[in-house]
Image (cartoon, rainbow, N blue to C red):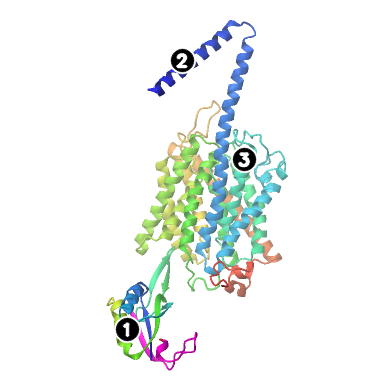
Amino acid sequence: MKNFATLCLTLVMVCLFVCSAQAHTSSGTGTANDPQSARIEKLEQAVADAKSSGDNAWMLMSSALVLMMTGPGLALFYGGLVRKKNVLSTMMQSFAMMAIVTLLWGLISYSLAFSAGNSFIGGLHNVFLRGVGAQPDADYAATIPLQTFMVYQLMFAIITPALITGAFAERMKFSAMAVFMVLWSLLVYAPMAHMVWGKGGLLNASLRGRFPCLDFAGGTVVHVTSGVSALVCALYLGRRIGYPKQPMPPHSVVLSFMGACLLWVGWFGFNAGSALSAGTLATSAFVATHFAAAAATLGWSAAEWWKSGKPSALGAISGAVAGLVAITPAAGFVSPMSAIVIGLAAGIFCYLMVTKVKAMFRYDDSLDAFGVHGAGGTLGALLTGVFASSAVNPIFKNAQGSTLASGLLEGNAYQLLNQLVGVVIAWTLAIVGTMAILKLVDVTIGLRVSEDHEMQGLDLSQHGEEGYYWESPA
Amino acid sequence: MTKIEAIIQVSKLDAVKDALHEVGVEGMTVFEARGHGRQKGHTEFYRGREYTVDLIPKVKLEIVLADDMVEKAVHAITTGARTGKIGDGKIFLSRIDEAIRIRNDERGESVL
């Protein structure tokens, strides 16, 4: 009752205030418009500020979530899959990306990816983060500081090379890995990010590139480039000593399990954050992401149950990651039901890649970076062209401003072609770039550790420590 | 004096310990061990790759007893550890020449 009275009183006061305001404005003549328009301007500014701080809060949160995907997410996921003697070196490869790529991004690679340039690579306008401050850049995200956009994109640039490390686990020199990753970030990641997301990029769908390839959160930029480069690394470096005769089971599926769960949560920042705002598009990407991960978990598990008789924990988490990979390019373009289809397809497809295709060709993609990220990313990029819906995200418009069809199911068959162009470019760039960098690093400092060091384990030989040292002095 | 070495299933350790305490065995040393007899091993699958695990985790107990206690202890171990299936383990008996208490150089059965 008391609340009701307070409410009534408030309403009355608001009415009085509005009436008096109107009386005030109508009482004056001639000069009255100025205070009114000034007030409207002030209100509009307040609304814009409120939206900006809401969007910025979500984007900073998303940036942190994506960083969490690399460390501890990916570090735990990969760390659990290797043998005990290589756990620290494997985690360290992910963690090193958090340091190395960050500095590189500030110095030059952000500029190469996102400053205005030609169709293939950005310019040097933003080296040393010059001009990257509190002012938004409307071409990328009109409501958040460009600096937020920069740091968000940085987290993607960190996890992408970290994904590759799964292919050469347990046998690459730390020094060679560091040099390889610096060159890879500059020669493969930056151009691909520019082509798909940068101003003037050949494949940019939102800024009218020549071949508009839909890639919401990095199916081609992150997963195809890293996955295909991973395959090239695995083939170039050769197998681990003893593979495939000697058993090399994961030393702790428990660590991998925790890592995969952190990846799933972090992926909300990755995909829903790629809306670059906190509006309805972020919600739709969030939901699609979650449904695809769930469906892919079931897809992989069902296939495994059918084939080898038991649904393993490692299978379930691998399926979830495969689904998250495949929905990445599609997240902001598809409905939840389409996301389920994409997830199911990815779960089964990646299971077959990892168990059958790898065994057939006998390459040692140690932690299945290609089988999950390369294969899942390619599948997801193509299926995006099938399922993209203009009702979810009206990205294509004609000159009059009315919405055009997005994907194949809506009748835009060309989109599948554009997706294919994006995928082919990503594959080509990854193969050629990675091959060249590997060759260069191989002839200068050498890629592989010595046979002795490989047997000893990389924790001791590369870092001088052990992951599990129980017998500490009393 | 006799040394009993018993290799048993990990899950049977508590039952064996209780049975031994009941017949008056006061001390024992327990090791985590790995091995196999006729049980062979089992297979595990990781991402479709099959691994044969032939060395299975086991527990090994070592107890040194006065001769008149030995049969009671052996009986306690077999009843505590038996499931009737392959893999229940084995017991080995051997003679011990001397026992010495480190604290005070005491020797013989009284040390036990």
x, y percent for residue B67: 34, 91
Inter-mark Cα distance, 3 to 2: 43 Å
Q: Do labels 3 and 2 share a chain?
A: yes
Q: Residue type at mark 2?
A: Val
Q: Mark 2 points at which residue?
A: A12
**Earlier-in-chain disc, 3 versus 2:** 2
Closer to the camera: disc 3 or disc 2? 2
x, y percent for residue A275: 53, 38
Q: Of the numbered discs in the image, which one, if any, rests on residue A148?
A: 3
Closer to the camera: disc 1 or disc 3? 1
- Within 10 Å of the Cα at label 2, are there few (<14), some (14-19), or many (20+) other Cα atoms? few
Query: Is residue B97 rendered magenta in the image?
Result: yes
- The C terminus of chain B, quarter of image: bottom left
Q: What element carries label 3?
A: helix
Q: Is mark 2 on a helix, strand or loop?
A: helix
The image quadrant of residue A4 is top left
Q: Spot the residue most to the bottom.
A: B97
Q: Residue type at mark 3?
A: Thr
- Residues in magenta, as a range: B86-111
Chain of the residue that carries numbered disc 1 in the rendered image: B
Q: Mark 1 points at which residue?
A: B73
The image quadrant of residue A9 is top left
Of residue A162 and residue A378, the one placed in the foreground of this image is A162
- The N terminus of chain B, quarter of image: bottom left
